[in-house]
Amino acid sequence: MAYGEVDVIGSGGHMTIGGLGTLSRQLGLATDQIVSAQCVVANGSIVTASASTNPDLFFAIRGAGFSFAIVTEFTMKTAPAPSEITQYAYNITARDTTSFTSTFQGWQTLVSQPNLSRQFSSTVTLSQGSMIINGIFYGPRSEFDALDTKSIMPTNSSAVSAQSTVVTVPFMGLGDPTLTATGSFPLHFYAKSVKTTNKTLMSNETIQLMFSYINATEKGSPVWLVIWDLEGGAISDVSQTATAYWHRDALYFMQSYVVSLTEPVSDVSKSFLAGLSLLVQNETGADQSAYPGYVDPELGDPQRSYWGCNVPRLQTVKAALDPDNVFRNPQTVSTTYNASICPIQQSPPPTSGSVAPAYMGQCTLLSMVLLVVVFYL
């Protein structure tokens, strides 16, 4: 089944917040593979959530689980494992960040093809002096080669160096041992994310502006990176309102990080990330959407950013299941119904008692940051 690559990330949080991974374009999110879950709700009851039992809770825990319950057991659907996979990595180095512009333009053109194979996963990771494009093609080398991914690689010159590695190996399971080994280091970091859809793709001019901004802007730390993760495929097959997870329309996410090795992240670093996100949003018309797994304490309206037009329904379920807000953090779903969020798409809240009885009486990518940190230590 589809899940992430870092073993130190807990499965419960991963599955109930969405759950992105290299198989997601084929199988969907981790949360899409939940058949049922045993949950402890706010009043202490142990209940089952599934499509046929407590469906509102089932809706909520698939994308916003931390606001609603403690999940103690999952029943998951699985799929046959692939027999062989083709792993690829393109490593490009340059002193000037703007030298990566054309490569990223080529990558966006590649991944935005309407009929791009769902067997193809891809991530672009930018750090000081380096861009790495890597991923897995869940199939034979001949089918991977037909994608012509090498065409986006720059020509070696005095300013840019490019190397590629492509190997076909037996499938041994998901997970990256290097990322897992570095995943438990405590550190100070700040992160932001921006969603790009097929309707908000960056123009070549915007991409040039973005890389010029990254190149010229003070970052406040030597340890920073920007990651673009390809999504789509099976993730987008599911309606945005079928589960709490809202970002079904994402083609890719941009995740940006700054790490401070010794002290809290500075305002300079936060300003760099905020300016990068704002540039992309202003130039493309992208909204304030953010993946809830990339926690951003600076969001002005985290509920809307994380769960979009699903917020009113989530607030209704929250009020019924957890009126005292037992399951809370500064960005959890509130118990107050807000009809102003996507009012045309939402139905009025149910009358008192129409939701609650169904539940009563029943018994980080972040690790890529850490890998960069290890390089600087």
Image (tube, grey):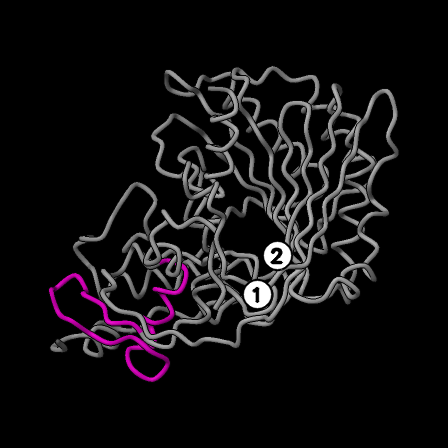
Q: Residue at x 33, y 73 (%)?
A: 56
> Residue 129: where, in percent of width, then height?
68, 23
- Residue 231's disc is 2
Q: Amino acid at mark 2?
A: Glu
Seen in the picture, residue 307 relative to 71 is either above or below; the reply is above
As helix, strand or loop, the secondary structure at mark 1 comes to: helix
x, y percent for residue 168: 68, 58
Q: Is residue 63 above or below residue 103?
A: below
Name the residue: 37% across, 80% down. 51
Residue 64 appears in which quarter of the rendering? Answer: bottom left
Q: Secondary structure at mark 2?
A: loop
- In front here: 15 or 303? 15
Residue 87 is marked as none
Q: Relative to 196, is 111 on the left or the right?
A: right
Q: Quadrant of residue 120?
A: bottom right
- Image point 30% across, 66% down: which residue? 317
Looking at the image, residue 12 lies above or below residue 39? above
The residues bearing labels 1 and 2 have C-alpha atoms spaced at a distance of 7 Å
Query: Answer yes or no: do the residues labelled 1 and 2 have beta carbons within 8 Å?
Result: yes
- Residue carrying label 1: 235
Q: Residues within 10 Å of mark 2 (few under 14, many from 20)?
A: many
Boundaries of the magenta span: 37-64
CA neighbours of label 1 inside 10 A, class few (<14), some (14 to 19), many (20+): many
Q: Amino acid at mark 1?
A: Ile
Locate residue 186 relative to residue 103 in the image: left or right. Answer: left
Residue 124 lies, in percent from the top left, at 66, 42
Give the percent coordinates (x, y) of residue 154: 84, 36
Query: At 43% from the left edge and 65% from the top edge, which residue is drawn?
Result: 31
Does residue 56 show up magenta in the picture? yes
